[in-house]
Each structure stands twice: as structure tokens, then as C-alpha cells.
Amino acid sequence: MGKDVIVALDLDCRKKVVDFLDRFTEEKPFVKIGMELFYAEGPAIVREIKARGHKVFLDLKLHDIPNTVQRTMAVVSGLDIDMVNLHAAGTKAMMEAALTGLTRPDGSRPLLIAVTQLTSTNQQRMEEELLIHQPLDQVVMHYAKCAAEAGLDGVVCSPLEAGEVHEVCGKGFLTVTPGVRFAESEVGDQVRVTTPARAKELGSDYIVVGRPILRAEDPVAAYRRCVAEFVG
Ligand code: C5P
């Protein structure tokens, strides 16, 4: 897999997803199915989107005891998805258990990515609510290192952190980066944001884009603009 734009299908029912994907007559975007859609439609929607020819990132952000995560990942690995994730805060033991669960009998498995700190978090919230008093970028790097040591393929982080993650964990360690906005668009609840072009300069491997595409007047044009800026 190379650099790509992942479209976040943050929609609450199958019909909206089908209407949205039907607009794409030429390309088959890599898509992200998050909790909203997965809880609404279940595994059937994953199978349907895979059958339409899309790569799928199942964004379930698992965070539970190792045994539960391992068993859940074993179920998830049967869905033929391309990427799935969990929270690095669940510890290395949880991440290692997840990898074990995810690996199919033939040795193959989807990419496994760890969330470091959500891109909606900032230093103040982390200190006051999570009682973490290290600088945010150091927290992200520490979680990234733990994920790499546990054998994961990469992390979800801000594009602003992608370069440093590559320095700390190696170039092959993937950075999947949400918090992307066009220069002129609204930030919403995201805090650490950049444009697709800047994410490319900063070395992101994948950008995850939701609202700037979903809420665009012409979503296909917005998707193409992301690809043009990010992939080139
Ligand atoms: O609409 P927007 O472009 O902000 O969507 C970003 C997507 O990336 C959402 O689906 C959100 O759940 C996801 N995400 C995130 N920050 C993380 C991990 C995932 O924004 N750290």
C-alpha cells in the first residue's frame, strides 16, 4: 500500500453510504468505516463495501482487556478488511494480544494501527482531564514507540507528528493522519489540523478525510482535490 486518501464514511445508515459511493463512477476510494456506521449496520456493510471493490479501514478503536481484544480481532480478521485499529493506551500486552487475534491461520492479517492521542485533544485537556503532564508530542512519540515494540504497523496521529514518528519508529512505520482540512474550510472539533498538501510535505502515509468530503457540495471533486494535493 502506498500513499492514499481514506474517506471517512461517517454516516449513520446503509442508504446514505450507497448514495455517497454511487457518486464515484471512476474511482474506488479507500474508505473508513467507523463506530457510527458499524454499530448501525454491522458486518454486512463491511462485506457490501468490500464487494464493491473498496479497501476498508475498520476504525473500531478497541480498548479493553487483552483477552477481549484478542477474541474480537479474531472475529474482525474474518471480514477481509485492509486496516483496523485500537488505542495504544490499552498497553503493549493488549496490542500484542490484538496482533495474535488478528493473524489468520495462513499468516496473513490486515494492517493494525494504534491511536496515540486523538487529534481533538490538546495539551490543556490532556493535563486537566487525563492527568498526563508530558508535552503532547512526547506522549504521541511514546505511544508510537510502544506500538512499534508490540509489532504494530503504524499509528493514527496528527500530520504535524508524522515526521517525528518516522524518525522515532522508522520510515516503514505507517502514519495515518486525520485532522485534515482544506485551507479555507471549517476546523470543527479537530484541533491539530493541516491541509492535504501540508500533510504530504510532513510525510503522512495516509490522510483520513471526513467532513471536508462528506459535506462538500461536490464530494467527488473534493475527494479528487485531496488526492491531487496529497498523492500528486
Ligand atoms: O470529519 P473529519 O475529517 O474531522 O473526520 C476525521 C475522521 O477521523 C473521523 O472519522 C474520526 O473519527 C477519525 N479520527 C480522528 N482522530 C483520531 C482518530 C480517528 O479524527 N485520532
Image: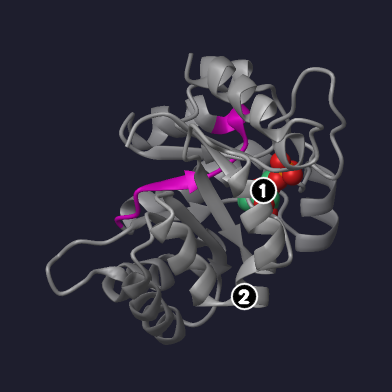
Q: Disc 2 to disc 1, how far (Cα)?
A: 16 Å
Q: Give percent across and percent down for residue 115.
A: 55, 54
| Bounds of the magenta segment | 151-161
* Residue in view at x 80 percent, y 40 percent: 215
From the viewer's perspective, is residue 220 above or below residue 143?
above
* Residue in view at x 43 percent, y 49 percent: 54
Q: Give percent across and percent down for residue 216.
A: 79, 33
Q: Quadrant of the N terminus?
A: top left
Position of 121 with respect to 90 (left or right) is right
> Is residue 219 shown in magenta?
no
The kind of secondary structure element at disc 1 is helix
From the viewer's perspective, is residue 161 above or below residue 176?
above
Q: Quadrant of residue 160?
A: top right
The kind of secondary structure element at disc 2 is helix
Q: Give percent across and percent down for residue 11.
A: 72, 59
Residue 20 marker = 1
Indicate the amino acid at tag 2: Glu
Decide which of 16, 174 is in the foreground and name it. Answer: 16
| Label 1 lies in ligand 1 vicinity (Cβ under 8 Å) | no
Q: Which residue is mark 2?
A: 41
Q: Determine the residue located farthest toward the left in the rendered image.
A: 106
* Residue in view at x 75 percent, y 34 percent: 212
Which tag is nearer the camera, tag 2 or tag 1? Answer: 1
Indicate the amino acid at tag 1: Phe
